[in-house]
Amino acid sequence: MKTHIKDRIEKLKNSFPDAGIDTLLVQVGENRRYLSGFTGEDTGFDESAGVLLISDKGLVLATDSRFEIQAQNEAHGFEVICYKKGLSKELPAILEKLDTKLLGFETRRMTCEQYDMICGQLAETGSEKVELVKIRGLTESLRRCKEESEIDKIRESLHLAESAFSGLLENIVPGMTEAWVAWEIEKRMREAGAESISFPPIVAFGKNAALPHAIPSKDTIKQGIPLLFDWGARLDGYCSDISRTVILGQPDETYARVFTAVYEAQQKAIDAIRPGAWTKEIDAAARDHLREKGLDQYFGHGLGHGVGLAIHEGPSLSPVEERNVRVEENMVFTIEPGVYLPDWGGIRLENMVAVRSCGAEVLNSLEVKL
């Protein structure tokens, strides 16, 4: 077992007493990869490449025949068990082997149907003394602060995405459709070595750019309108996320005013980043600046989100008090203020930052230009 994975598992197990469990059932794909190195991917919410069972008594990766060899090759230190009739049928025997009494399960991945099947099978096999305990964010709390090797992988993924976009930007001309440009971004990232995309690219022209998550259409590029791009690559499991807004031709007064305000808001937020700062404070640094410019009512989403093995993970930077947490060194998250004016368009600028002892390290190399 690789040292970094062994260390992650030990940190996780150290949290078991406070969580009130002796075994953790890991179903979330990113958590499974983080704790085992197994890269099998779930093909749908109701399908699974496998689960981990972690306890002081042993480490198990339970999967089906599609992933058995892959799991054996990747999940070193785990006993790989291939279930023939589904996880719920195999689980009682595994739990007995691990002497499990308190089984934690990840609430964000366990469905009601799965829960009922597992409880039913435990009762049928006489294992009803196993208590199921709801677990929220246990592994995610470890993933929130990145190891230096993880930051390097994120940076590499980001630079790949930026390079693909730079090559495309030089060739963008009026008449191209949003859908074609979105495909071209994806194709260039894959040709550059990305294993996949972080999410379907957002490409929005003109009025469509006022939709923060616009779906690329057959609308075409024209001179003098905002062109908003949001894209990212996945490389070695790690995601990148970047937004840029450009214009063909000379920007009008509205574009220049809004772009400058969004850029300044982003810089003020980046300047506010430091270990110990509250995420809500960082969000406010950008939002307050847009309020001074009379544009805050057109900024409806949060300022940023963590990025790693998942495109959206902790921490969340927003004005919502329930999501307010203190920033820690080696967190990686986006800073992406945006202004969206109905019937005109929108401007969003997104960079990724790593939190360092002295402040924020901007991981991007792609310049922001008016």
Image: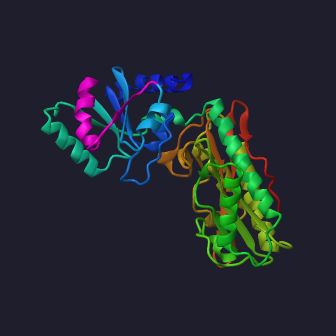
Q: Is residue 108 left or right of residue 346?
A: left
- Residue 310 at x, y percent in the picture: 54, 46
* Vertical side of 206 occupied by 128: above or below: above
- Residue in the foreground of this view, choosing between 99 and 292: 99
- Residue in the foreground of this view, choosing between 305 and 48: 48
Q: Is residue 295 visible?
A: no
Q: The C terminus lies in which quarter of the figure?
A: bottom right
Q: Is residue 316 left or right of residue 252?
A: left
The stretch in magenta equals 77-100
- Residue 142 at x, y percent in the picture: 51, 32
Can you tell which quarter of the image residue 270 is in?
top right
* Vertical side of 216 occupied by 308: above or below: above
Can you tell which quarter of the image residue 175 is in?
bottom right
Q: What is the number of callouts on the image? A: 0
- Residue 343 at x, y percent in the picture: 65, 79
What residue do we see at 47% from left, 37% from top?
70
* Vertical side of 183 occupied by 142: above or below: above
- Residue in the foreground of this view, choosing between 11 and 36: 36
What residue do we see at 33% from left, 38% from top?
105
Q: Is residue 54 left or right of residue 296?
A: left
Q: Confirm whether the magenta stretch covers residue 81.
A: yes
- Residue 277 at x, y percent in the picture: 62, 38
What residue do we see at 44% from left, 27% from top?
12
Can you tell which quarter of the image residue 148 is in?
top right
